[in-house]
Structure formats: structure tokens, C-alpha cells
Image (tube, rainbow, N blue to C red):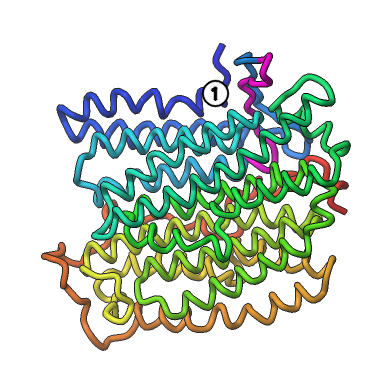
Amino acid sequence: MIGLLTLLIFLPVVMAVPTFLFGKKRTNVAKLLGVGTNATVFTLSVIIVVLFQYGSTGFQFTDTASWASSFGLNYVVGVDGISLPLLIIATFLCLLAALGSRDMISLREPEYYALFLLFETGIIGVFTSLNLILFYVFWEVVLIPMFFFIGIWGGPRRKYASLKFLIFTYAGSAIMLFGFVALYAWTGSTGSPSFDYDTLITRAASLTLPLQVAASLATFVGFAVKLPIFPLHTWLPDAHVEAPAPVSVLLAGLLLKMGGYGLIRYNLLLFPAADKLLWPAFTAIGLITMVYGASVAFVAQDLKRMIALTSVNHMGYVLLGTFTLTSVGVSAAVFQMFAHGLAVGMLFLMSGYIHEHAGTRNINELKGLRGKMPTTTVLLILGSMAAMAVPGFANFISEYQVIQGALSVAYLYGLAILAAAPHRLSRPTARLRCISFSSAGKCHQAYGRPRPFRSLPGGKIDHRPLGSDAFRKLGSIRTVSDSRRFD
């Protein structure tokens, strides 16, 4: 019998086939199947959230099957407190992006929705895999649709952006794979070789320090490219600017979380001795990434580029929280990824509607949107407030906990974060106010003939997921299976 989690993983890719074939005959069928499948997958993920045993340790909803056991290759999937928040945010943002695609994607729709469903299978597989090679397969599956999303449906410089994305991500993946293979070779010298996560984590403490450091650095680079951190982030702004808005939702809301999830699940938990040696360097990189991301966002003139660069800042918080090596810091990093996905997903979707109706994303030309696009403006403000960690929003809680974790291990890092916070908030706040409320100027209509200004289709959109009280049950999840390890 197929388990619920396996059904959740493979339903999208199975439905990708009829979506493509039937969509070739009628375009509306591709939209219907694409959105309908995403709605079904989201419903299944909600069922998992409801049935999840909160407060208990270990993995739940596990499914296992023999693949090539003699080589340590098995199909093993499961969910715990680390992966559950990312699973629900993945299915929610995929549904949100699919709904947004109905209005923003009009070229080769059967291919688009088929690739969309392939992406969804890959991203869910990444967050639930408990075998290193299975994880790597799903990791690579995600990259294929994203390359075509940018290269086919992107902007004028889409070929450059998609190729740059491919080179960076595959280079990082190759280095990450080296770390995985090193672990596999080591398990072969101490018993039967295995890629299974449970086997590796039980043997992690006996890894020699040189091997831990080498494998930790290799996996860190692979995950850091995807997170991304400074200076491995340069593919991100180009990819976001050229990608259509629904794809940017997937890119910032989910693809970046793959890097953060990998750091916590594999880099942090498998190499305890290396973590204690390397944490000052990793947290320093996180702090630099935070300050750099906020600084370069100041000078961005493109709305999507500014949002993308602020995401670099947010992922710096994830890196810093992870390598505080405290339970509060790691839990905050997971919650930061969840909260950031909600906020940035809304921001990129709103930027797409603004570009579609105003004809530009140039911040200097976008003024007085409140009177012309009131619903979009309200959602843009709410998403921006959440992204800026205004008290009352989930991001404030996660960033406060990161600071708390940093202060508990090194006051210097905590004070540096506090010093950088006003710098991060000042100008984005002023620019948002100008875009939304300034009455001077008109929206520039330079790119053809955009549709008239109007509110979003479908009436009101519920913005409650942005609030800190949303998904209250997720707040009680034990995000670290054994929190004592980090204290």
C-alpha cells in the first residue's frame, strides 16, 4: 500500500503527464490540472500537519523500500519537526504560484504546468528524503524545471540568467556530492556502506576530525550556493529579475530553503566535531551576508531585484542561527525559513501584478499605486512589513530568536546584528512608502500596452498567513530531534 507521504511526493509528477498531453489539445485543461493537482497536494500536506504527533521525537509517516541495498541505496522518506514546516510551506507556495500563473503565463502552458509539477515532486522529495543519494536525485530534479522556467518564460536576458543559474548550482551540487561520497566510503570502512540518514547519524560521532572537516566544508559549499551566501549569491538577482513572478515565488520561497534545510539536516547534524571547530567562520559569513544583502538592496532600482537581495539578508539569519549550535538558534533558523517563504512569496507575486499592470518594475517610476491598485498595495505593504520583521509578524519572532541564540554564544555577534538592523530597515521602508502613497508621477507604461489598473482577480486574498499567529501548531513542533545536542 502506498503511504501518504509517498503519494504526496509522486502525485505531481504522475499528473504532469496528462497535464502535458491533454493540455496540448486544450490550454485550459493544463491550467485546470496544474492548479487542481497543487490544491490536492496542499490538502494532503494539511492532513499530515493535522495527524503529526507534536512533541514526539523521530521521523513520522516513514516509507521505506529496497532500491539497491548492496550499495547502500534505499528509498527512505519521513517527516520530523525540521521538515514539516518546510513541507507545508512548499505545498502552499506551489499552490499560490500556480494560481498566479493563470494570469501571468500565456506561452507554452502545457509545458509550463508539466514542469511545474515536476518541480513540486522534486522540492517535496528534498524535504522528506532520508537517504543521501535519494536526496541528491530530488535535489537535481528541482534544478531542471527551474532552468527551463527562466530560460523559456524569462525576460530579455533569460538565456544569460538561466545559464548562470545552471553553472552555479551544478558546481555546488558536484562539491556537495563529493562530501556525500566521502561519508559513504567511510561507512564502508566501519561496516556495511550506507547512504541512509539514520545509519550515518548513529555513526557520526566516531568520524575522524579531518574527515568531518573535509565533508563539512564540501557540503557547506553546496548548500551555501543554494542558500545563497556572500559571495556565492551572484546568480540570484539575475535569476529573479528575468524569471516570471510565479517562478520567483518558487525560487525565493522554496529553492533557497533547500540550502538552509541541507545545512541543518546534513551539515549540522552529521559533523558535530567539525561544527564546534568551524562555527566562528560560518557565523561570521552569515553576519557578512546579512549586512551585505541589506546594503546592496539599498541601491537596487528594480523592485524584484530589491526583494531578491533582501532575501540574501534573510538567509544570512538562517546561516547564523544554524551555527550558533543552540536549540533556540536552530529552531529559529527553521522558523525563519518558514516565515520568509510566506512573506517573500507574497512580495514576488505582488511585484508580478504591479509589472503586469503598470508596465515597469522601476522603483523610481512606481508612485501612487494606492489609488490605482489598492488590494495589491495592501498586500505589498503587509508582505514588506513581514519581511522587515515588524513586531506582530512571524519574521520578528524568528529573527529575535536568532539574536537570542547568537547572544547566548557570543555577545559580539548579537550586538553586530542589533547594530545592522536599523540600517537594514530604513531605506526599504522609505522606498515602499514612496511607491505606495506618493501622489507625484504616474506609472510608466513603456513595455507595450499593459492592462488597466485593477485589483487582483478573485476579490480579496486572505493575508492572515503572514501573521505570527498563523499555523499555531507549527510553533509547538520540536524542530530538533534531540535538543540537548545543541546546548
Is residue 406 left or right of 147 when viewed as pictured? right
Look at the picture and state if 194 lies above or below 471. Answer: above
Rendered-image quadrant of the N terminus:
top right
Would residue 42 appear left or right of 238 to someone viewing this image? right
Would residue 72 be counted in the magenta stretch? yes
Q: Name the residue: 26% across, 35% down.
A: 111
Q: Does the magenta run of residues contain 16?
A: no
Answer left or right for 349 relative to 454. right
Q: What range is drawn magenta here?
A: 69-83
Is residue 401 among what the camera can see? no
At 63% across and 14% down in the image, what residue appears?
66
Which residue: 35% across, 72% down? 302
- Sort mark 1 into few (<14), some (14-19) or many (20+) by Cα contacts within 10 Å: some
- Which x, y percent locates residue 380? 40, 67
- Circle 1 — which element? helix
Residue 417 appears in which quarter of the rendering? bottom right
Q: Is residue 317 left or right of residue 254?
A: right
Q: How many marks?
A: 1
For the residue pair 274 and 129, the one nearer the viewer reads as 274
Asked where in the image residue 57 lies, by quadrant, the reply is top right
Q: Looking at the rendering, in which quadrant would you find the C terminus?
A: bottom right
Residue reaching furthest bottom?
440
Task: Where is residue 150? Give x, y as percent.
Answer: 33, 50
The residue that mark 1 highlights is: 6
Q: Is residue 356 above or below residue 473?
A: below
Which residue is farthest left?
Answer: 449
Task: Write the residue at 12% across / 65% down.
Answer: 448
Q: Residue 295 appears at what percent x and percent y?
A: 53, 78
Amino acid on which the number 1 mark rests in the picture: Thr
- Judge by depth and name the residue closer to the eye, 342 or 288: 288
Where residue 446 sits in the image (x, y, percent)?
16, 72
